[in-house]
Image: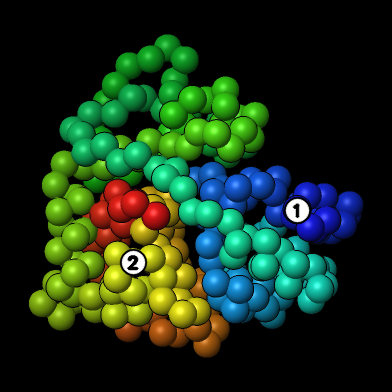
Amino acid sequence: MPRVVAHGNGTTVRACAACHLPTGTGHDESAYLAGLPVNYFTRQMADYKSGVRKGSGSMTTIGQHITDYEVSAAAEYFAALQRRLWIRVVETDTVPKTYVGPGNKRLRLPDGGSEPIGNRIIEIPEDEEVVLNRDPRLGFVAFVPKGSVAKGEALATTGGDGKTVPCAVCHGPKLAGLGDVPPIAGRQATYVVRQLYMFQDGTRAGPSAMLMLPIVQNLMVDDMLALAAYTASLDP
């Protein structure tokens, strides 16, 4: 790993691997970086640096202090990593009762129990001990409402009668990326919902984000949830 990925700079730039893991698969609160195009990665860091991309105080600070050389080294490292299956999507009516615990992770309540899923995605570790220790061997299970994967597939493949645009137009066959446009197959479902919402409300701005604005402007949160359930269910 490049030094910036393994250690950061010791002060203002946190090690990339601390949040995104050495494998680039990340956790539900951080992005899946493995296999991202170098130019896309570099643009996102420039957007954090300029302030047009918001939503993460940590990344804003890092963007303001990281050097161009460190950005380039990190971009090349993560682009070269093999994408791997990291999310298991399960459609269900009920989910384990959960709480937000250490490391901003959603975890099962120690006392157990279940509750209706409602209109939510509940994403929890396959193995809490593994995930809390930042071990990259196991990922997450995303519980989604029944029928949401099929609804998301219809939106993603047809555009939903003009509500949006088929995802493959920009993200390529199987949503595995196309040129500098990133892959979205197999990404964390909760992360995808957040990004779609932030494109819509302007939290993610800048030249590349403007391409997404007409795509998301007519989407309801239910649509975002369905799209995220579908893309997360795909093999990366």
Residue at 59% over, 52% down: 24
Numbered disc 2: secondary structure: helix
Residue 131: x percent and y percent? 56, 31
In depth, the one of 161 and 67 nearer the eye is 67
In depth, the one of 226 and 203 nearer the eye is 226
Q: Quadrant of residue 200?
A: bottom left
Q: Is residue 98 above or below residue 212?
A: above
Residue 174: x percent and y percent? 30, 65
Left or right, residue 189 beside residue 219:
right
By what rule are the colours in the image chosen? rainbow
Q: Disc 2 marks which residue?
A: 175
Q: Amino acid at mark 1?
A: Met
Residue at 66% over, 47% down: 22
Residue 28: x percent and y percent? 49, 45
Residue at 50% over, 79% down: 180
- Which quadrant of the rendered structure holds the C terminus? bottom left
Numbered disc 1: secondary structure: loop
Which of disc 1 and disc 2 is earlier in sequence? 1
Q: Is residue 227 above or below residue 43?
A: above
How many numbered marks does the figure carry?
Answer: 2
Q: Quadrant of residue 39?
A: bottom right
Left or right, residue 149 beside residue 201:
left
Q: Disc 1 marks which residue?
A: 1
Res. 213 in view: yes
Q: Is residue 236 above or below residue 47?
A: above
Residue at 30% over, 49% down: 233
- Please give the label number shown on residue 120: none
Residue 35: x percent and y percent? 53, 62
